[in-house]
Amino acid sequence: MLQRELGTSGIRASAIAMGAWAIGGGSWWGENDDALSVRAIHTALDEGINLIDTAPVYGFGHSEEVVGQAIKGRRDQVVIATKCGLRWQRQDFGAFYFERDSRRVFKSQHPDSIREEIEISLKRLGTDYIDLYQTHWPTLTPESEPISATMECLMQLKAAGKIRAIGASNVSLEQIQEYQRHGVLDVVQMRYTMLDRKIEGALLDYCQAQNIAVLAYSPLEQGLLTGKVGMDRIFGEGEIRAGKAWFAPVNRQRVLDMLAGWHDLNRKYQCDSSQLVIAWTIAQPGVTHALCGARKPEQVQDNAGAGRLVLEPADILRMRRDVEALGEPLPV
């Protein structure tokens, strides 16, 4: 399994990471079999995937609890990444963000809130330190919760040994630079897929120059780029994919046609579409890791296979040209 460093932290993590949002279940993803989720995490470790990314809000604590259950006795094999900044237990920090499953969620990066959050996450995960601790979303109240205060708190937690590296998710280039002014930022986690390449250019170039690792989430566009979401699939109200432009039938067909055009590459590399897409993703300049969600052992095994592929430059370029020719989703 290909491994890459998380910035300047000295932590080496598999280029393919297991994203643990889906195993949190709830109305986003539906109910899960926790025993199966634990087996999926064990499979990840056995396959050489040591980076497991979760967050408190995934299943409102449930994802972290399942990860904690799975890593008992194997903590030294795991690079745990979790997050802070989305609260539902208390409503006296931050600003209202959204409501889901009868819970009102608030955004907050106030130091007092972060200090509470990390203790709760440590308990759920069954550990006394977190390898990578990330702010989940920028605060809605930057004037009262400045990045300077957030970063000072995170640096204190790092000095205390409770975290090993600091990351920020869903941030702008200007916000990344503000984090750097007040401490060491080793990682940014950003949405990046073949179908959504907004971070290319200034942000990716800057991170590469500054030796900041970039963890790309949703590289398979929530399953669309696996080629397994057929034209007969219908998404119910409230499902995570419902209403998204690329999943509309007219756009879904275009994506499936593009993937079908790469069947010769599937044969050449002896891989399926999802492995080809993931391998392409981590071959892009500046993208160091791909966060691939999974709930079943066979999904994990499939994702892990991408970490063993080395695509030829000509094929990487061909795929990019096809993706760029696809363009934006048609209006629906």
Image (cartoon, grey):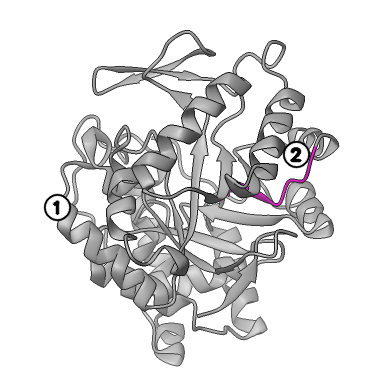
Question: Does the magenta segment cover residue 189?
Answer: yes
Which residue has dot 2 on it?
176
Residue at numbered disc 1: 33
Query: Which residue corresponds to the image point at 43% horizontal and 86% vertical from the top-left?
Result: 264
Disc 1, SS: loop
Distance between the Cα atoms at labels 1 and 2?
Answer: 38 Å
Q: Is residue 247 magenta?
A: no
Helix, strand or loop under label 2? helix
Vertical arrangement, residue 96 with respect to residue 3, above or below: above
Magenta span: 183-191
**How packed is label 1: few (under 14 Cα within 10 Å), some, or many (20 or more)?**
few
What amino acid type should be assigned to the residue bearing mark 1? Asp
Instruction: Give, as a three-letter code, the residue at label 2.
Output: Ile
**Which residue does the image show at 73% across and 53% down from the upper left?**
204
The image quarter containing residue 293 is bottom left
| Residue 59 at least partly seen | yes
Q: Position of residue 307 (x, y in %)?
A: 49, 77
Given residues 289 and 231, the one toward you in this image is 289
Q: Which mark is residue 141?
A: none
- Residue 216: x and y in percent read 56, 55
- Examine the image and state in which quarter residue 174 appears: top right
